[in-house]
């Protein structure tokens, strides 16, 4: 058995369909289906009951799911040890962050949660779903993510732990001078005006939040015209700097441009929103340095979120 085969089987078990599992495994549906067929032909048996929706594992495969998960975890660790023999993996933590948090909050966490000598941190970046999947699959000890205030965690708290580090505000901002008729908060509100907008795609977490916010805003006098989309806050800020339109940026990322006067806040016309900044982990034994890191975060790291 190869690690990739086990991960393919587990992906279908978790997702309930070949198409969704293919996306999680970064393959096209046709390529993923061919690979599943190849695994079954190599083993000489069917692994899935395709007559049911969602697809389920055959009983003999369901019975060994714990063994498959343990084997996958062991093989990943062996792969790490072989690839990086000079690194003591017990002295390193892996933190996977939502893209915006990689640049804004992750550096603060590392500053306040000192790892000490002979220890290091590997910082990865991804979409929110990728961050949660990484801690589920034991590819990272911790996930740094946003959560909607007041909504239940996505991972069952029976199997996971989380620390709410604070809240970060996303504010609508625009390049100063781009739309002067809208920028003066003291001026009368323009009637039937329109503004170009740089948005997050609706297929990602921040895009869903923004779409919900704009759909429910009370002030509909300003028409927003979507001119560009990006899933990366660090790319979105560059689009705003170039004058493409108004964009919703985390306070920590937009702060220097607001202070310098390069950006003008538009919260007098358009709503902002706040999200919880959360560190999540699975309830399992972690290497000593990872446990120390977790305890340090619990002891008030004094993060500046704004």
Image: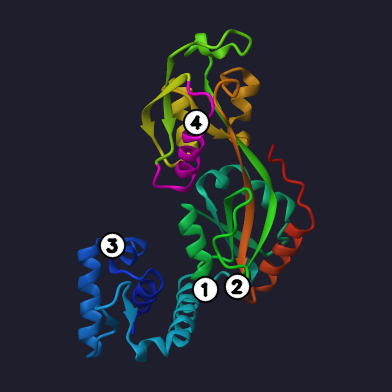
Residue name at image x 52 percent, y 71 percent: 138
Left or right of 41 on screen, residue 116: right
User: Which residue is labeled 3 in the image?
Assistant: 27
Residue 33 in percent (x, y) is at: 22, 71
Tell me the number on the disc at residue 85.
1
State the extent of the magenta-drawn residues as a range. 202-220
Where 296 falls versus 256 (above or below)? Answer: below
Task: Give the alpha-carbon distance from disc 1 to disc 4, as whole Å.
Answer: 40 Å
Tell me the number on the disc at residue 237.
4
* Contact, mark 3 vs mark 1 (Cβ under 8 Å): no
In the rendered image, is residue 88 in sight?
no
For marks 1 and 2 on the same chain, the one whose residue lies earlier in the sequence: 1
* Contact, mark 1 vs mark 4 (Cβ under 8 Å): no
For marks 3 and 1 on the same chain, the one whose residue lies earlier in the sequence: 3
Residue name at image x 66 percent, y 67 percent: 290
Q: What secondary structure is marked by label 1?
A: loop
Tell me the number on the disc at residue 50.
none
Q: Is residue 217 magenta?
A: yes
**From the viewer's perspective, is the residue at label 3 or at label 1 nearer?**
3
Left or right of 174 on screen, residue 106: right
Q: Is residue 181 magenta?
A: no
Task: Give the alpha-carbon distance from disc 4 to disc 2, as whole Å.
Answer: 36 Å
The foreground one among 289 and 51 is: 51
Q: Quadrant of residue 251?
A: top right
For marks 1 and 4 on the same chain, the one whose residue lies earlier in the sequence: 1
């Amino acid at each position: 058995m190869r690690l990739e085969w086990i991960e393919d089987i587990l992906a279908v078990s978790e997702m309930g369909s070949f198409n969704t599992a293919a996306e999680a495994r970064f393959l096209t549906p046709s390529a993923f289906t061919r690979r599943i067929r190849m695994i079954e032909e190599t083993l000489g048996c069917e692994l899935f009951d395709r007559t049911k929706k969602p697809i389920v594992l055959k009983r003999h495969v369901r019975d060994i799911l714990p063994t498959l998960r343990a084997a996958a975890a062991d093989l990943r660790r062996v792969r790490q040890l072989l690839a990086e023999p000079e690194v003591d993996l017990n002295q390193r933590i892996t933190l996977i962050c939502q893209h915006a948090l990689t640049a804004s909050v992750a550096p603060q966490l590392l500053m306040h949660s000192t790892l000490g000598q002979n220890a290091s941190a590997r910082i990865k970046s991804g979409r929110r779903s990728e961050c949660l999947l990484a801690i589920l699959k034991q590819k990272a000890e911790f996930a740094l993510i946003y959560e909607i205030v007041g909504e239940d965690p996505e991972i069952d708290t029976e199997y996971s732990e989380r620390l709410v580090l604070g809240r970060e505000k996303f504010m609508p901002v625009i390049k100063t001078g781009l739309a002067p008729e809208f920028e003066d908060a003291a001026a009368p509100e323009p009637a039937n005006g329109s503004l170009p907008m740089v948005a997050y795609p609706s297929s990602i977490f921040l895009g869903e939040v923004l779409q919900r916010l704009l759909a429910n805003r009370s002030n509909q006098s300003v028409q927003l015209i979507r001119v560009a989309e990006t899933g990366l806050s660090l790319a979105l800020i560059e689009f705003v700097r170039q004058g493409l339109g108004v964009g919703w940026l985390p306070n920590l990322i937009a702060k220097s441009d607001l202070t310098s006067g390069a950006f003008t806040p538009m919260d007098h016309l358009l709503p902002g929103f706040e999200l919880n900044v959360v560190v999540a982990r699975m309830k399992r034994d972690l290497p000593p340095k990872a446990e120390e890191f977790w305890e340090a975060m619990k002891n008030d790291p004094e993060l500046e979120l704004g």
